[in-house]
Image (tube, helix red, strand yellow):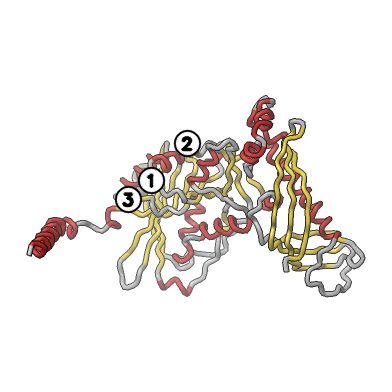
Amino acid sequence: MRKSLFNKIILWCVILFLLILAPTSLDMPSQSVVRAICTGLAIDTSNESGKLEVTAQILIPEAGGQYTQKLSLVSYDAKSLEESLEMMEYQVGKKIRMEHCCFIILSNAVCERNITTILDYLVRGNNIGNNTLLIHTDGKSKDLLSATSNVNSSEVDNLQVISEYNEKYLFSGGANLLSFYHDYLSPHKTSYMANITMIKDDKSGGNGGTDQSSGSGSGSGSESSQGSSSSDKGNTQEDVVTSDGSVAIFYKGKCARVVTSEEREDFNWLDPKVEKAMVQIENVSDNILKNATISYTIERKKMTHKFEIVNNVPTIRINFDLGLQTEMVLQGDESSLPIFDDYINDAVTLAFAEKIDRAVKNSMNIQKEHGFDVFDYYKEFSINCNADWKKYLSSLENPDDYMKGIEIFTEVTCYSAF
């Protein structure tokens, strides 16, 4: 009896609670009415001295028989990122929410200054996800953001797809918001991000079937929108976003160097996480081949490091164990060749050893020139030979120049991956 009475009291309490909340919930407007969903940001320098031009890519859902959406670009020039976003809210009449912001594009002009002071608002105020990608572009970031807004809705994440591919096959550890600050505050002060740009000659000849409208905002702001619908599916559009595998390397919060695709391939030999890369060696000669060109896919790459300090010289010895798959063999005199499953011998190993040695020296020379430490050798020396490492740093006029004294030696072993 008491249990039944207690259950009834609980039931009536729940009903009363729901009755109190129901009017408020029913009267609450849709979140899309009061909030604007920002899916991407572009940050450029403004024509006005000391100001930033910030552009937000805002997703606007639309009601209808089928799901459709618009991507609206809103820009505002202000002295800081937070001020720009605040003025955008006045412009669109909604609170701009950053929880779904997937990427932030930074122009090279912006990256000439310490970008940690620009992005501090997003990190410190917990206004955005920590995994938001940071992307560098050598052009105007607003143009790149606009180009990704013009593609079909199924390709809105084009920048994410390119960045994720680059991190998997071209270079590992691309920067997101959290990792960038982590590297900035670490002793090596180095991070890097994908460099994505636009194809200069756009031959698309139009907007690919998308409807566009534009208007002007108050003050120094502006707004444009791109819509997409199911009728666009029959139209084709040439992609204007491109990446050649180049990487922007940041040191102490500023872009120190944009490493070209060829230079990035040299850096990859020091990156143990990058596999499945295609490598070509030339002028291979033995009892069968004469000045041959051979292409391989590196199916497995094992690197063993030894860190030591000899006579106050930091030394890294790296043993490369490469599992290769032969992809192409071209004889220098164009004569016919027998079919090889995997052509790997001493001549091939020697060619790889020479290629890796040149690549490692080139990448180290670039790091020594600019002072950055892409692979955080500071941490490795500190762990493996702490006392001698501290002695080495104390012997330098400027401890930040520790990369200039580091020497690397390599040994290579090749074998068939199959």
Between residues 364 and 416, which one lies in front from this camera angle? Answer: 416
According to the picture, the residue beneath numbered tag 3 turns out to be 92
According to the picture, the residue beneath numbered tag 2 turns out to be 117
Quarter the C terminus occupies:
bottom right
- Image quadrant where residue 369 sits: top right
Q: What kind of residue is marked 1?
A: Asn
Whichever of callouts 2 and 1 sits on the residue coming sooner in the sequence is: 2
- Image quadrant where residue 188 sits: top right
**Residue at coordinates 48% horizontally, 54% vertically from top-left?**
145
In x, y percent, where is residue 23? 14, 58
Residue 127 badge: 1
Foreground mark, 2 or 1?
A: 1
Q: Are marks 3 and 1 in contact (CB under 8 Å)?
A: no
Query: Spatial distance from mark 2 to mark 3, Cα to Cα?
Result: 26 Å
Between residues 365 and 196, which one lies in front from this camera angle? Answer: 365
Crowdedness near tag 3: few (<14), some (14–19) or many (≥20) residues, C-alpha within 10 Å: some
Query: Spatial distance from mark 3 to mark 1, Cα to Cα?
Result: 19 Å
In x, y percent, where is residue 56? 41, 50
Determine whether 222 is above or below 327 in the image: above
In screen coordinates, is 198 left or right of 404?
left
Residue 99 badge: none
Crowdedness near tag 1: few (<14), some (14–19) or many (≥20) residues, C-alpha within 10 Å: few
In x, y percent, where is residue 167? 58, 55
